[in-house]
Image (cartoon, rainbow, N blue to C red):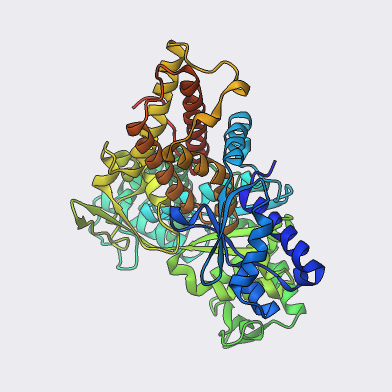
């Protein structure tokens, strides 16, 4: 069942417009916004409809609002409907609707925030996809948390979601990795040799070198080409194994690992180049093969698909890879990329267009960099020198739950400053602790109620009319708005909205708890308040589940 209060309000408004001006007026309004009110005194929701109707009917917003409010006030959904100059209408939801929302979440539990709009269409979320040239760092952690939460959220909207990791296991960076590893092995064998400036210098290669030597023995007499090929396969396999292990500790798993080498083995790259050639969109120049990006997107430069030395570029592989994705029947493809790839976006969009797929079927989410802060100072990092805090180190220091919450606490397109000391605090200053503590506190209340046999046996007989305080009303409103929050976060691909909502819900609950006794002498009131806090518990549990964060019962 779709429990969107905004859609109920929208339906009420559309009925009212039709009642006032008939189908003609209804057709003139293509869209109008319904948003949460910014201040409590303005009610629960607000619409800009009077502005829009004023422009098409040549009537003042105030006059239009009079007619609208007169009709909307008769709706059972609202307790108050008011005009707000210069052209808004504010709505306060009726107490009867708030009570029904509480009952629905108790009855439906996690299904309370499920929607049918996805119609079980296939959606792919491809994320992390770090080159297997070293350990995952904190930036990859942000991508992992973001992709996993998005996939969970889209599942709530009734999409069939597949998580995919794309492995770049061929090309220049893999050869560079193998050569760097070879040097580390030779260093272990006593040879005085340095890794070149453009090589991989991380100490993780020393460990890999030791593992290889234990398995393989001395390799000094081997031909370079032969050993580089062998080291390439070994390094990719070992590093991918570590990446999988780190992701598992982070609570992230993938349905499919797609290897770039498959594009070559299965002639998928040759196939897509043939398609583009048939459309006259590729040409040779200066010994290289080019794609006519400029023919698809204005002001874009043509891009190289195959270099003079015969090696294919990442762009060529990505075109073939996305062709393969679409052929697998996905309704929508979502790629999650780091900010360093933002300039790459137009050329991939041009390729998707060239292949004949709708541009809106591809959505690329760009996430910004992560910087770490400890004791008020930024933690220096250099990936070139191999000096950075890995995702594994971060998890060992702050734990999975704090890491995921902090990564998801800001919109993807905002730079994230990760405060390591704050993430470890067991105080209300730490937002994830504050939220989890709300859940644990409610669990303690419910357990105490069971011990005292104060828990309502029959929810149908609970008298919710006794929930009359402003603090109780605020919690009821937040519960009623929960489905909309889940839907909008999923549609916008912005799970950070759920972290903001959770902090507000936890704060409202803790404030309620300091002002009201849940288990008291009045058994009827106790039952009503237990009903309310049980609903809050379910809401917290549901959203933490979407974000991939645990909901402890004791802290």
Between 273 and 164, which is closer to the camera in this rendering? 164
Between 459 and 387, which is closer to the camera in this rendering? 459
Q: Is residue 549 above or below residue 50?
A: above
Would you say residue 273 is visible in this rendering? yes
Q: Is residue 81 above or below residue 349?
A: above
Between 431 and 89, which is closer to the camera in this rendering? 89
On the picture, is 205 further left or further right than 42?
left
Q: Is residue 134 above or below residue 424?
A: below
Would you say residue 227 is visible in this rendering? no
Q: Is residue 316 above or below residue 153?
A: below
Tell me which corner region of the image, top left, top right, bottom left or bottom right, holds residue 331.
Answer: bottom right
Percent x, y of residue 88: 55, 66
Q: Residue at x 44, y 66 (%)?
A: 339
- What is the tally of numbered marks visible in this picture? 0
Q: Residue at x 57, y 40 (%)?
A: 95
Percent x, y of residue 134: 39, 53
Percent x, y of residue 555: 33, 27
Percent x, y of residue 272: 71, 69
């Amino acid at each position: 069942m779709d429990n969107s209060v905004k859609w109920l309000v929208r339906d009420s408004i559309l009925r009212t417009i039709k009642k006032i001006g008939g189908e003609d007026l209804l057709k003139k309004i293509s869209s109008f916004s319904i948003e949460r009110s910014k201040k409590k005194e303005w009610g629960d929701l607000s619409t800009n409809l009077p502005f829009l109707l004023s422009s098409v009917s040549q009537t003042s917003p105030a006059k239009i609002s009079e007619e609208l409010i007169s009709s909307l006030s008769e709706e059972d959904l609202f307790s108050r409907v008011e005009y707000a100059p210069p052209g808004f209408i504010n709505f306060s939801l009726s107490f009867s609707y708030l009570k029904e929302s509480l009952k629905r979440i108790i009855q439906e539990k996690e299904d309370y925030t499920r929607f049918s709009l996805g119609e079980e269409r296939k959606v792919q979320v491809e994320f992390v996809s770090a080159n297997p040239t070293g350990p995952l760092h904190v930036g990859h952690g942000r991508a992992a948390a973001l992709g996993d939460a998005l996939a969970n959220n889209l599942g709530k909207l009734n999409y069939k979601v597949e998580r995919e990791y794309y492995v770049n296991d061929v090309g220049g960076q893999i050869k560079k990795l193998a050569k760097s590893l070879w040097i580390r092995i030779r260093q272990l064998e006593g040879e005085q040799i340095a890794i070149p400036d453009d090589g991989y210098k991380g100490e993780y290669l020393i460990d890999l070198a030791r593992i290889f030597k234990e398995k393989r023995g001395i390799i000094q007499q081997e031909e370079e080409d032969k050993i580089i090929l062998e080291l390439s396969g070994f390094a990719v396999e070992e590093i991918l194994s570590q990446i999988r292990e780190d992701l598992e500790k982070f609570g992230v798993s993938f349905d499919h690992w797609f290897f770039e080498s498959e594009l070559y083995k299965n002639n998928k790259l040759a196939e897509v180049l043939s398609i583009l050639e048939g459309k006259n969109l590729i040409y040779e120049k200066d010994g290289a093969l080019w794609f006519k990006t400029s023919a698809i997107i204005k002001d874009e430069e043509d891009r190289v698909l195959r270099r003079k030395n015969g090696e294919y570029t990442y762009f060529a592989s990505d075109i073939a890879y996305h062709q393969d994705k679409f052929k697998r029947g996905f309704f929508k493809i979502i790629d999650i990329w780091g900010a360093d790839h933002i300039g790459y976006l137009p050329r991939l969009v041009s390729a998707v267009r060239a292949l004949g797929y709708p541009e809106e079927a591809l959505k690329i989410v760009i996430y910004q960099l992560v910087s770490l802060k400890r004791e008020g100072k930024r933690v220096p990092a250099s990936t070139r020198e191999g000096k950075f805090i890995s995702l594994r180190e971060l998890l060992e220091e702050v734990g999975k739950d704090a890491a995921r919450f902090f990564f998801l606490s800001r919109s993807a397109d905002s730079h994230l400053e990760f405060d390591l000391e704050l993430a470890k605090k067991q105080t209300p200053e730490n937002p994830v602790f504050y939220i989890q503590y709300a859940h644990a506190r409610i669990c303690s209340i419910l357990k105490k109620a069971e011990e005292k046999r104060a828990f309502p046996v029959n929810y149908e007989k609970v008298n919710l009319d006794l929930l009359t305080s402003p603090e109780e009303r605020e919690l009821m409103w937040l519960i009623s708005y929960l489905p909309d929050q889940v839907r909008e976060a999923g549609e916008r691909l912005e799970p950070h909205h759920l972290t903001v909502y959770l902090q507000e819900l936890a704060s409202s609950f803790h404030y309620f708890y300091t002002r009201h006794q849940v288990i008291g002498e009045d058994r009827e009131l106790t039952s009503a308040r237990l009903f309310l806090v049980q609903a809050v518990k379910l809401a917290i549990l549901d959203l933490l589940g979407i974000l991939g964060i645990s909901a402890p019962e004791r802290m």
